[in-house]
Image: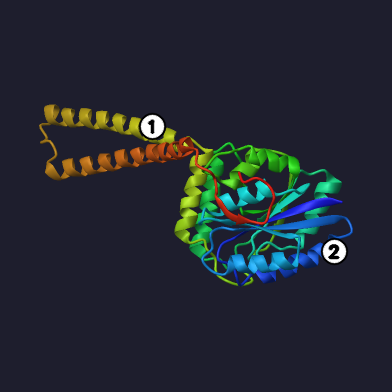
Amino acid sequence: MKLLSLVVPCYNEQDVIPLFYNEIIKIAHKMESYLNFEIIFVDDGSSDNTLNVIKDLNSKDSRVKYISFSKNFGKESAMYAGFSKSKGDLISIMDVDLQDPPELLLDMYESITKLGYDCVATKRVTREGEPPIRSFFAKCFYSIINKISNTEIVDGARDYRMMTRQMVDSILSLKEYNRFSKGIFSWVGYKTKWISYNNVQRAAGTTKWSFWKLLIYSLEGIVAFSTVPLAIASIVGIILCILSLIFAVVTACKTLIFGNPVAGYSSLICAIVFIGGIQLFCVGILGEYLAKTYLETKNRPIYIAKEESLDNETI
């Protein structure tokens, strides 16, 4: 029988892990005649009792595996670790908070094995329950990145998906330190089917994604999959040069022909502050790309595993 590796990143999720496990076992029972399961929990440096809860499940069920990080490396690192340790013919990534409906695994498996898809991904058609400002900025992000990037990022796309071994191996071949998986999933290609569903509330606990963290993550996605901001900085510089030349010519004509006095101290300060702000903005864009390049050249590991119940070598 085929083996499905279920990768589950966890960060301070002690309350919801048992609920998640119970739901997954129900699905596993429905598929046990033709599909084996391994559940890989990735403890992303949790400060609560998450690891002990996972160890307890591991002691009771041999299908449960775990990796525990030495500190909080982030969800992207947790996904990479789970992928690199998975042994399955099929690999699925899920959030532990049960906002990803486990029953969709049945449809995903059917679509890959019978319809020939390499990946079955999910997207939310509603954001009911989310703060309105977060939903607004999320829509803005997807709109912007799809305009400035050649890699399509589907609006409302979730990390929740099932993939073939070949596709996951392709993802693992991208060793970049600054990872934006929504873009990587799309960049590697392969035949993908999308399943839509309504937003589901967390089963327990609270989200670890603050507005600020989501904003930083979106900026990382833009830097990772588009160089348009660099072009914008150049274009802004050119436009300002042209405007300054036009302003200089107009000022000279008004003074020489009409005898109008040159604008005074206040207008000069405004112009200096405006141009200085534009310069800092453009330098900031350059600095962001330079910082990402700097981190890549250090060649630091994507994660460090402190403890694990898997046999594979740590990557």
Image quarter for residue 93?
bottom right
**Residue 266 position (above or below residue 61):** above
Q: Of residues 188 and 239, which is closer to you in this image? A: 188
**Residue 231 position (above or below residue 194):** above
Residue type beneath disc 1: Ser
Q: Position of residue 44 (x, y in %)?
A: 56, 58
Determine whether the residue tagged by mark 1 lies in a helix, strand or loop: helix
Identify the mark at residue 234; answer none if there is no mark.
Answer: 1
Per the model, the C-alpha gap separating discs 2 and 1 is 57 Å
Q: Of residues 171 and 58, which is closer to you in this image? A: 58
Q: Position of residue 291 (x, y in %)?
A: 41, 40
Residue 76 visible in image: no
Residue type beneath disc 2: Lys
Q: Position of residue 124 (x, y in %)?
A: 65, 58
Residue in the image at 71% along x and 66% along y:
59
Quadrant location of the C terminus in the rendered image: top right
